[in-house]
């Protein structure tokens, strides 16, 4: 391997490391937002907003690195697909950051008012979503297809919990109009968490396509595998 | 210009045409879903689902074309940025399709029950979102920065309407618990439309960055313009 190739390998390694860092920030944001909800933190820390700014900064940095690598290294085959997957994952992680900011807005509404009910399903949804983000990124960095498939399966659990939360909160709203504003805020938090899990699922699907050349996004739509994909 | 360059120009032109086609489908889906809501279509046509499948097919086709162009043409500078913008727009349009499918799920809930109120703001939000999608794509294809800026400004109107819809429907829910399920479905439709407008805004921001080399996504985060951007 010549020094040019070694340098390129290092650049790809650094790109993966940056995405891992971004994912760790996103996870921390989810944890922080839900902790503020559960512990009814009336003076929420600036931690979520600061992490969000760092995520935005990283997004731009990674986008620029993707353009630079494509222009200067002119990669083909699996290196090219790896870099394009990194670009997509970058955008998924940034949207996860946005969704956590949306969650904190609803948390802010909730902590101003008396608690509606003990929270069990929403913290559980948050734990699963965080785990999905972590595992999807781990699957990307290590090329672990089985782990990516596990992430996709976990999404069904998150969807199931979201439906349960929705049904339960509708019952609250119907029996007592005073609960409507709080129940709606909780419903929206559950939906944001569901969408975070969807983004983790997107990442896991990209990992499977990257490694197997098999598109799992729209299973009914036929597609041709790329010529260099494993059989 | 040699025949190799002419061929590449034609490929870029075809890529833009495919995105325009995808955007036209997305627009038609929005129109169809909201018409079914307004006209209380109890037997909704399969039109939205069929258009969604076509959008998914196009997404895969465009993704493959992006990989092929990057691998075989090894573009640099503005061509490279154009192709990367196409890849992002492709993913925004596919998500718009998903959001319309979410809208139709809520429409289905609503047309089973008596109408809650005359709908004015939601069809208005749908019109604005459709217009934003159309104009964002037009700005991309023609390189029209002013039009892209107009799209970004229109997003504030959509957000304003969404807040208005939310306030009004909360009032309904609080005064009569029988309206809760329908009001919630309408709130979710308004949020899906708001997110469609956000995707159109993303596209417009990408167009501005493509042309001016100025990142308008996170205005507080400094970034270096690409070396070949206009001053």
Image (tube, coloured by chain):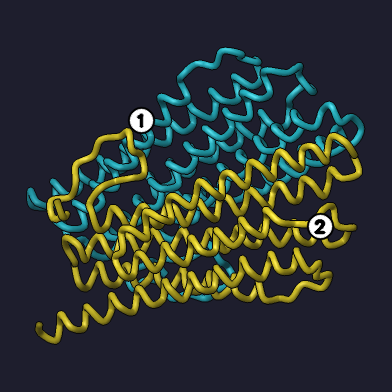
Chain colours: A yellow, B cyan
Q: Quick one: B28 or A105, which is closer to the camera?
A: A105
Please provide percent x and percent y for residue B197.
58, 44
Residue at 69 percent across and 64 percent down: it is A34
Q: In this view, does B71 lie to the left or right of B24?
A: left
Please provide percent x and percent y for residue B108.
61, 23
Other-residue count near label 1 (Cα within 10 Å), few / some / many at <14 / 14–19 / ≥20? some
Residue at 71 percent across and 41 percent down: it is B162
Q: Is residue A165 left or right of residue B8?
A: right
Task: From this view, report whether residue A205 is shown above or below residue A47.
Answer: above
Other-residue count near label 2 (Cα within 10 Å), few / some / many at <14 / 14–19 / ≥20? some
Task: From this view, report whether residue B154 is shown above or below residue B110.
Answer: below
Residue at 68 percent across and 55 percent down: it is A122
Mark carried by residue B54: 1
Please provide percent x and percent y for residue B86.
35, 50
Name of the residue lying farthest toward the bottom: A3
Name of the residue lying farthest toward the left: B3
Residue at 84 percent across and 26 percent down: it is B178
Q: On what subunit does the disc labeled 2 rest? A: A
Residue annotated with mark 2: A109
Asked if both marks, 1 and 2, belong to the same chain, the answer given is no
When asked about the image quadrant of residue A123, the answer is: bottom right
Q: Is residue B220 visible?
A: no
Please provide percent x and percent y for residue B71.
17, 58
Helix, strand or loop under label 2: helix
When asked about the image quadrant of residue A103, the answer is: bottom right
Q: Is residue B130 left or right of residue A11?
A: right
């Amino acid at each position: 391997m010549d020094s040019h190739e070694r340098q390129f390998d290092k650049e790809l390694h650094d790109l993966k490391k940056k995405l891992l860092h971004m994912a760790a920030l996103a996870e921390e944001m989810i944890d922080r937002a839900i902790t503020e909800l559960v512990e009814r933190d009336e003076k929420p820390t600036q931690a979520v907003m600061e992490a969000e700014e760092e995520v935005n900064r990283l997004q731009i940095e990674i986008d620029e690195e993707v353009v630079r690598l494509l222009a200067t290294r002119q990669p083909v085959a699996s290196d090219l697909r790896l870099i394009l997957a990194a670009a997509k994952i970058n955008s998924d992680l940034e949207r996860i950051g946005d969704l956590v900011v949306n969650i904190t807005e609803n948390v802010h509404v909730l902590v101003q008012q008396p608690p509606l009910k003990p929270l069990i399903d929403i913290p559980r949804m948050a734990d699963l979503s965080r785990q999905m983000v972590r595992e999807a990124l781990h699957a990307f960095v290590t090329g672990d297809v089985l782990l990516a498939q596990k992430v996709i399966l976990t999404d069904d659990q998150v969807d199931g919990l979201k439906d349960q939360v929705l049904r339960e909160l509708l019952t609250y709203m119907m029996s007592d109009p005073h609960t409507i504003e709080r129940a709606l805020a909780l419903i929206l938090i559950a939906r944001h968490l569901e969408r975070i899990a969807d983004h983790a699922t997107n990442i896991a699907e990209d990992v499977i396509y990257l490694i197997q050349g098999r598109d799992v996004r729209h299973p009914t739509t036929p597609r041709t595998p790329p010529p260099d994909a494993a059989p």
